[in-house]
Image: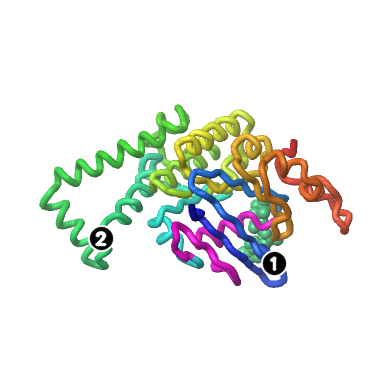
Amino acid sequence: MAAMLEVRGLVKRFGGVTAVNDASLDLREGELLSIIGPNGAGKTTLFNLISGLEPPDAGSVRFMDQDVTGTEPERLARLGMARTFQHGRVFANLSVLDNVLVGAHTRLRAVRPAIPLLGPLLELGLAAIRPAAVRAEEEALREDAKRILTLFGDRLLPRIDNPAFSLSYANRRRVEIARALALHPKLLLLDEPTAGMNQTETVEMQEVVHDLKRSGLTILLIEHKLEMVMRLSDRVIVMDNGSRIAEGLPQEVRSDPAVIEAYLGHRETGAAAPAREDVS
Ligand SMILES: Nc1ncnc2c1ncn2[C@@H]1O[C@H](COP(=O)(O)OP(=O)(O)OP(=O)(O)O)[C@@H](O)[C@H]1O
């Protein structure tokens, strides 16, 4: 079976820095692939190239059997690719529920026929003639949003009407993931979902991601916390200085000398290259 995501030879340069250097990967349906590596290894840039945030200088991305190289994020979302960001991006003035509904509405727009200009007018027209149908649709979206929020236990549900700006950092990150899930994605890209979280919150998030994986969702994960990577991943790719330095099963990668060197060793410059979070 063809991979859901096929990345070939991606390159991205910023001035003299090659942030991503000939990156390739395959991700099959239902798999969880983690990308690890020291700070500045190029992980987030790789995500940006895959999710259409930045165009690559070379290489290609295929998703669901389509060439989507350089395709804008909105279109990728419609095709079923959702992502979250390293520092969490939510609509600060919207409530928890409305943040998630934004994701749901994006999905609805995707399944409706695209009729430029006429589309919004048709929607208004429909709302005027069939208010009950529109209400029922809104109600279904709300129910779906609440179902997604229950994935986070009692972290978000009691705060469903609170504005996102009033939430803790960890809760804002949960809201962002909930919004991505409201797209009903086929592929979810998670950029350090536990960054800035304490141990309890990290374990909780690990369970959420585990549940998503068990539900069959295909996941590409950037994560510094190796315990989580070891527990969740089917495969792991290790990046350093923009390049892939290792790939394999979690246990294989963990004992790879090149990986140990990148995480713990001293480079030619003599500078240590520690990962930001725990390396255990
Ligand atoms: N927009 C940009 N302009 C210039 N340089 C950039 C830009 N984005 C990334 N870089 C550089 O590219 C390299 C890779 O950065 P990137 O953020 O992708 O690494 P990372 O592995 O995600 O690191 P971290 O774990 O700290 O998030 C770094 O040297 C970074 O400074």
How far apart marks 2 and 1 lie (CA) works out to: 41 Å
Mark with earlier residue (2, 1): 1
Residue labelled with disc 2: 113
Q: Which residues are magenta?
A: 40-68
In the rendered picture of this protein, how many numbered marks are placed on residues? 2
Q: Quadrant of residue 230?
A: top right
Residue 18 tag number: 1
Q: Is residue 45 left or right of residue 183?
A: right
Position of residue 171 relative to residue 271, above or below, is: above
Q: Is residue 7 left or right of residue 152?
A: right
Q: Amino acid at mark 1?
A: Thr
Q: Residues within 10 Å of mark 1 (few under 14, many from 20)?
A: some
Q: Nearer the viewer, residue 16 or 7?
A: 7
Position of residue 217 relative to residue 56, above or below, is: above
Label 1: state its secondary structure. Answer: strand
Q: Quadrant of residue 18?
A: bottom right
Residue under the point 64% across and 61% down: 23
Asked whether the residues under the numbered discs 2 and 1 touch, taking CB atoms below 8 Å apart as contact, a structural biologist would say: no
Residue under the point 60% across and 34% down: 202
Q: Nearer the viewer, residue 268 or 248?
A: 248
Where does the image place residue 179, in percent across and percent down from the top left?
A: 42, 45
Position of residue 142 relative to residue 70, above or below, is: above
Where does the image place residue 59, in percent across and percent down from the top left?
A: 58, 68
Residue under the point 71% across and 67% down: 17
